[in-house]
Amino acid sequence: MAKVLVLYYSTYGHIETMAQALAEGARSAGAEVDIKRVPETAPEDVARDNHFELDQAAPIANVEDLGNYDAIIIGTGTRFGRMSSQMAAFLDQAGGLWARGALNGKVGAAFASTASQHGGQETTLFSLITNLLHFGMTIVGLPYSFQGQMTMGEITGGTPYGATTLAGGDGSRQPSQLELDGARHQGELVARTAAKLFG
């Protein structure tokens, strides 16, 4: 049974919701799945004044945790077309894992959220994927086996590089059914790939 970690940073809950869907998909393929989040780096008064969702159910991850999994799916909201500083600060602490080759050959994947269709979904995914490649990981995206990303019937997230959602400029839009289905599909593919490599 593959061990999968869904690791995320979510300011307002959109990525938290996507993380749950990715975990569902991985579990549907028989994986043992943990969901963890990275620490908040904004001062608590700033976070509360800006209505950050601070009371999330997922436990806080430790960098050393990463070496305990066959696959790691990493998600964050975008900040000016790249990953959030909270996620970057966490991954920047993984030098010891990198030096030991602790993640070499493991499965990696990325997911993201942006305010708009053109707010940097793909560049944010690539900022995450770049880290995963430096760690020596094998990348699983969201291929067109998920036909939902071919739709012309609605505005939606979803790219071949990973599942995404659109939050809206004011954060009021929640992940759509189609976006959640894409996340589940990617989670299932990650788990199946890890099972083939490590089963």
Image: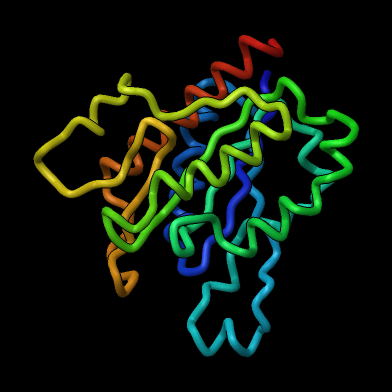
Q: Indicate the position of residue 186 as horizontal and vertical percent values.
A: 44, 30
Question: On the rendered image, what quadrant is the C terminus found in?
Answer: top right
114 with respect to 30 (left or right):
left
Image point (88%, 36%), residue name: 99
Q: Indicate the position of residue 20 as horizontal and vertical percent values.
A: 49, 46
Which color scheme does this rendered protein use? Answer: rainbow
Image point (66%, 57%), residue name: 88
Q: Is residue 131 above or below residue 143?
A: below
Quarter holding residue 192: top right
Out of 179 and 89, give the one closest to the viewer: 89
Q: Indicate the position of residue 67 as horizontal and vertical percent values.
A: 81, 35
31 with respect to 52 (left or right):
right
Quarter holding residue 9: bottom right
Q: Is residue 10 above or below residue 155?
A: below
Image point (48%, 36%), residue name: 24
Image point (64%, 57%), residue name: 87
Question: On the rendered image, what quadrant is the N terminus found in?
Answer: top right
Quarter holding residue 136: top right
